[in-house]
Structures are given as structure tokens and as C-alpha cells.
Amino acid sequence: MELIAIVTGLAVLQGFFFAFQVGQARVKHGVNAPAISGSPDFERAFRVHANTIEQLVIFLPGLWMFGYYVNAQVGAGIGVLFIIGRFVYRSAYLGDPKSRSAGFGIGALTMVVLVVGGMIGAGMKLM
Amino acid sequence: MELIAIVTGLAVLQGFFFAFQVGQARVKHGVNAPAISGSPDFERAFRVHANTIEQLVIFLPGLWMFGYYVNAQVGAGIGVLFIIGRFVYRSAYLGDPKSRSAGFGIGALTMVVLVVGGMIGAGMKLM
Amino acid sequence: MELIAIVTGLAVLQGFFFAFQVGQARVKHGVNAPAISGSPDFERAFRVHANTIEQLVIFLPGLWMFGYYVNAQVGAGIGVLFIIGRFVYRSAYLGDPKSRSAGFGIGALTMVVLVVGGMIGAGMKLM
């Protein structure tokens, strides 16, 4: 499970990096806390971060369940795809929010494979 | 702990389903990303999802702690109640946000029982 | 790992307490759901809670990885610092959002130490 732990670390550090960029966008676009709107560019960075955190809440349990009940190396590989998908999502969203589907899709697909695969693995061990 | 893993999978898939519905509400009510306001109906779906993700962050550690330190079958049963409570919360909130208390209460109560129960179980093992 | 579980429980209960205060701020400042803006005081309580939940998503995996791969007692101690940092953050933010840096910094630093430390610990076990 060490590989799963390392991919977990990379994924949450990515989330923290996106948070850091929201802080930078606050300064750059003059959106003072507690406001979360007022500049479309700030709002894009804000939504990229928020969406990533929301997906981590689904992704991380799936990653560990898949790694434990199915296969840790395959799970870690799918986890790396998730992280890449989040960078693709971010680049697309910052450029044009309408183009975010592909990056979103990679994240969503890997997430569902991990969660459903982990549930099947747990279910088979139960039987 | 397989039962706990399966309930975890169901809970995060519910969170993902609510996210999917936010996307649908964006299209239906014409709220283009990165905006998160402008239509009360969209905002309701948005808040149901956001509140569910926030509760998952508290619920999931509680579920695993309770399952591991107290009882996995009881923990899984309480976890299913949490998921039902979230559906009740969603139906009520989409109809009239003022009526959301009952569904919120089920989620909050199960969450607190899992977290506090898990802490007591861990504390007793420590002594 | 019982100490890690207890610190986890304290951290998520703190998150739940902040959520409860958002509900109180809704009533006090007349911000009816699903609105999340309209009163700067409400928005401050709202952002304190949202930021805490976002950090928990990064903090909790780090706490468990550090506790398991490095040292559970040291990890639990750093975890307590994180919780204290969140109270400092909240007090500062509610008073004046511009003064939130110190409390934010404690949370961010402890979070990074836990995540990076846990990754190094996992990596060393892998080799």
C-alpha cells in the first residue's frame, strides 16, 4: 500500500497547490476575502480548486479500497491518471470553462473505476 | 471491514450523483461556469451537493473508526441511515430549503454517533 | 494508531462545530438558504468553515500516513497543532479577514509536514 500512500500524497499536494493559486488569484484580481466572486478569472481558479477538493473526497476512498481489495499497483496507476486529468481540467478551465469536459471526464472515469472496482473487490471478499 | 468499504462506496457514489445533478442544473437553468449563483433552483442543487461533500469529510473517518474500534456491522447500518438521510435532505431542500432540517438532522446525528463512538472505542483500546 | 483516531475525531468535530456556526450566522444575519452571500459577517463564518473542510481533505490522509509510516505520537501532536491553528484562523478571520495569515500558516505548515513526512516514510518502506 506504500504506492497508494505516495499517490495519495501527490493528489492532496496538487489540491493544496490549487488552493495556493486561489490565494494568488485573490491578490492579482483584487478579490478580497471573504468575497468569492467579482472577477471571472478569480472565479475560474476558485472553481478549479473547489471541484478538485470535491473529487478528492470521492477519489481517495476509492483509491484505498481499490488498492487494498483489488490491486495496489493498478490502483496507483489509475490514481496517477486522475492527477493528470486534474491538471488537464485546470488548464482547460482557466482558458475557457466550456472546454473543461475532457479533463473532468478523466477525473470522473478514474474515480468511478476505483470506487466501483473497490466495492466489487470488497464484495467478493465478503462472499 | 468489507461492509464498511461497501457503504463508503455507496456514500461517495451518492456524492458523485449529486455533483452530476449540479451539472444538469447548470444547463437547465442557464448558469454557466464559473458562476455559482443566478438561479435559485441551481443554487439549491449546488448547496445540496456542497453540504453533502462537507458531511462526507466528517462521516467517512467516523464510519471507519466506528467500524474498526466498535462494530463493523452496526457502523455499516448507521452509515446506510446517513445515506438515506442525505436523500431526504435533498428532496426537502429542492422543494423548499426551509424544510431541510429533518434530513440534515439524520445526517448530523448519524455522523456524530459514528465519530464520538469511534473516539470512545479508540480511547478504550488505548487504556 | 488510537491516538491518530482520536485526533481525527477532534478535527472533524471541529469542522462540524464550524458548520453549526454557519447555520447560526444564517439566522443571525438573515441569509436564507440557498444564498451564500449578502452579509459580510455570514460570509466570514462561511469561508472559515469551507476553508477548514478543504484543509481536512489534505490533513487527514497526511495525519494517517505520518502516523502509520513515521510515528503515531509525533503525528498526533502535529495534528493537535493543526486543530489549534484552525481556531486561531477562525478568530482572526471573524475579526478581520486580512489578519488570517498566521492561523492559515499553522494549518498549512502542519499539513505539509504530515503529508510530505508520510510520503517519505512510505517511500523508505518501499525501498
Image (spheres, coloured by chain):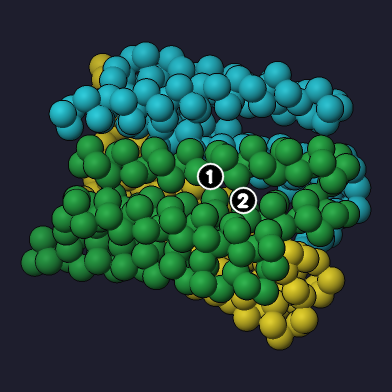
Chain colours: A green, B yellow, C cyan
Q: Which chain carries label 1?
A: A
Residue nearer the viewer, C80 or B68: C80
Identified at 45% across, 22% down, the residue is C113
Q: Left of C17 or right of it: where is A29?
A: right
Q: How many marks?
A: 2
* Residue drawn where x is 81% and y is 23% of the image: C99
Query: Is residue B23 visible in the rendered structure shown here?
Result: yes
- Which amino acid, by three-letter code, is at mark 1? Gly
Sequence-wise, the earlier of marks 1 and 2 is 1
Q: In the rendering, at what x and y percent does residue A23 appear?
A: 72, 38
| Mark identifier at residue A49 | 2
Q: Which mark is residue C12?
A: none
- Along the line of sight, which residue is nearer the eye, C122 or B95? C122
Point out residue A19 in the picture as x, y percentages from the top left corner. Answer: 63, 41
- The residue under the point 68% across, 68% down is A97
- Residue, x 49% and y 47% (percent of image)? B57
Up-down: is C92 above or below B74? above
Q: Is residue C47 at all visible to an observer of this figure?
A: no
- Give the answer, above or below, for where C31 lies relative to A33: below
Whether C39 is drawn above or below C83: the answer is below
Which amino acid, by three-letter code, is at mark 2? His
Q: Is mark 1 on a helix, strand or loop?
A: helix
Please give left or right for residue B77 compared with residue B45 in the image: left
User: What is the C-alpha distance between the residues marked 1 and 2?
Assistant: 7 Å
- The image shows residue C46, relative to residue C103, as above or below, that is below
User: Would residue A116 appear left or right of B37 to someone viewing this image?
Assistant: left
Q: Mark 1 points at which residue?
A: A15
Tell me whether circle 1 and circle 2 mark residues in contact (CB < 8 Å). yes
* Spot occupied by residue B90 in the image (x, y as percentages of width and height): 60, 71
Image quarter in which the N terminus of chain C is found: top left
